[in-house]
Image (cartoon, rainbow, N blue to C red):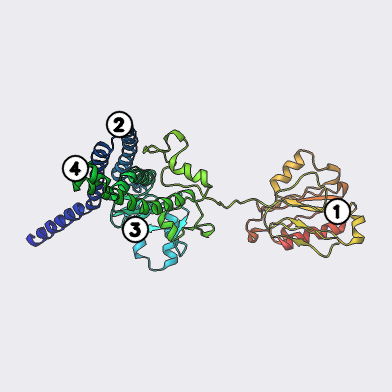
Amino acid sequence: MSNLGERKKKTNSCAGCMRVLKWIPVLFILSIIVWSYYAYVVELCILAIDNTAEKVIFLLFYHIINTLFLWSYWKTIFTPAGTVPSTWRIPEVEIERLLRIENQEQQKRLLEYIAKDYPVSNRTLSGSIRFCDKCKIIKPDRSHHCSVCGTCILKMDHHCPWVNNCVNFTNYKFFVLFLGYALLYCLYVALTSLECFIRFWRSEFVEQGELGGSMGRFHILFLFFVAFMFAISLISLFGYHVYLLLVNRTTLEAFRAPIFRIGGQDKNGYNLGKLANFQEVFGDDWKLWFLPVFTSQGDGLRYAMRTQQVYQKPIYNSMGATDARLEVQATDKLIKNNQTSTTMSSSCNVSSEFREDDEQQLQLEPKISYLPTAAAAVAAAAGDVSPSHSLIASAVKSASCSSIIANVNNGNVVIAMPDLEVVTQLPDKEQLPEIKLIDASLQRNVVEIHKIA
């Protein structure tokens, strides 16, 4: 027991040391900001510049930029990272079942069952639901596990040591503003100190005694170089994140494109257009775009996608000018009397090819189509089918068997068939009701329809 207690104390002490070490980059940045404030305000503006109006203008804009810069930096550091809600946690019973399963397909089906009520579209390389075995949760779209924070983060971009925080859904706007204002701060300091820097190299300060010693020259020289070097590095970093912002992509997604349930791997899966992408992070109110206040859209769990699969039921295209287009199932087929060739397109829009000598007989040949039983009953009740030319066969005992309505008025025959979702549920040929039609060829067509279905 004593050994176990000592190990816990060592672990806690090590964890405490690591937490302190993580703040070293932040303290380094803050020390540079504090020193640059002294060098710019005291050494440059107060001691080196004689023109009062120039001093006031320089100090005014400097403090505005510096305030926005520090405000954005503060929000980036101390905004809590967005974590996955506890409602996404998998129950312990399901976790045990999941860990016992060794077959990948069975595990995939179990994860699909567990996540059936969650709005997830991202998948793994194997096509399975994304699952964090450390946090024991279903991963929402665009979320990842951060090894530094020790938890799954919503819309994780990366873990930044310079802010000691994860750049994610909750602070991504603040991070982009921080980079932008940091770049603006460095450029402003470098440009406004350039004149004094040039005068220093010409030794005018030494001759006129304006700086009162070498320390003043050192601050001016070092201030310009530090601002210039940071500006160069920030240009590339800020430009890269502006690009990611406009294409709606995180740093992790730029290195490895997300995989979607429909469409597979797509690096532009969340690209909605530059304006929409910008507004997703910065919000709709332009007055708050450049202030470090949270205006991002959404909850971090659901995201709009560029392409979404649109399912449309195919529309039956008859051989000519029927009064109404009939909505049919994907298994529907068209049989034309006395026709040897019938074609069907992949979108289930059926068009028949006729011989040139048959085109004149088009109005005389019966046109056959069929629709679900319920639709046929409504059509009959509404009087769309002429009673003098239609016969309604008696339904058989099976509930899936349809009534058949044959309308031979104007050469059109409408036959009501069952909803053919499962072909094996169709009644046998012998179960079809007897149909008495005027033309024996039409009776053969009904039998052929049953065979094809």
Give amino acid for label 2: Thr
Q: Does label 3 or label 4 sit earlier along the sequence?
A: 3
Image quadrant occupied by the C terminus: bottom right
User: Which numbered dot is residue 52?
Assistant: 2
Residue carrying label 3 = 95
**Looking at the picture, how far across and down is residue 120, in whole percent?**
45, 52
User: Do residues under tags 3 and 4 come within 8 Å of each other at their CB atoms?
Assistant: no
Instruction: Locate residue 419 relative to residue 97 in the image: left or right.
Output: right
Frontmost of labels 3 and 4 is 4
- Numbered label attached to residue 212: 4
Q: Is residue 280 positioned above or below 449 on the image?
A: above
Q: Which-is-in-front pick, marks 1 and 3?
A: 3
In the displayed structure, does residue 245 sit left or right of residue 225? right
Identified by mark 1, the residue type is: Pro
Precedes in sequence: disc 1 or disc 3: 3
Residue 354 falls in image quadrant: bottom right
Q: Residue at x 51, y 43 (%)?
A: 276
Mark 4 neighbour density, 10 Å: few (under 14) some (14–19) many (20 or more): few
Residue closer to the observer: 83 or 44: 44
- Element type at mark 2: helix
Give the distance between the C-alpha atoms of the residues marked 2 and 1, in whole angstroms: 98 Å
Q: Is mark 4 on a helix, strand or loop?
A: loop
Q: Which residue is under mark 1?
A: 366
For residue 351, what is the image quadrant? bottom right
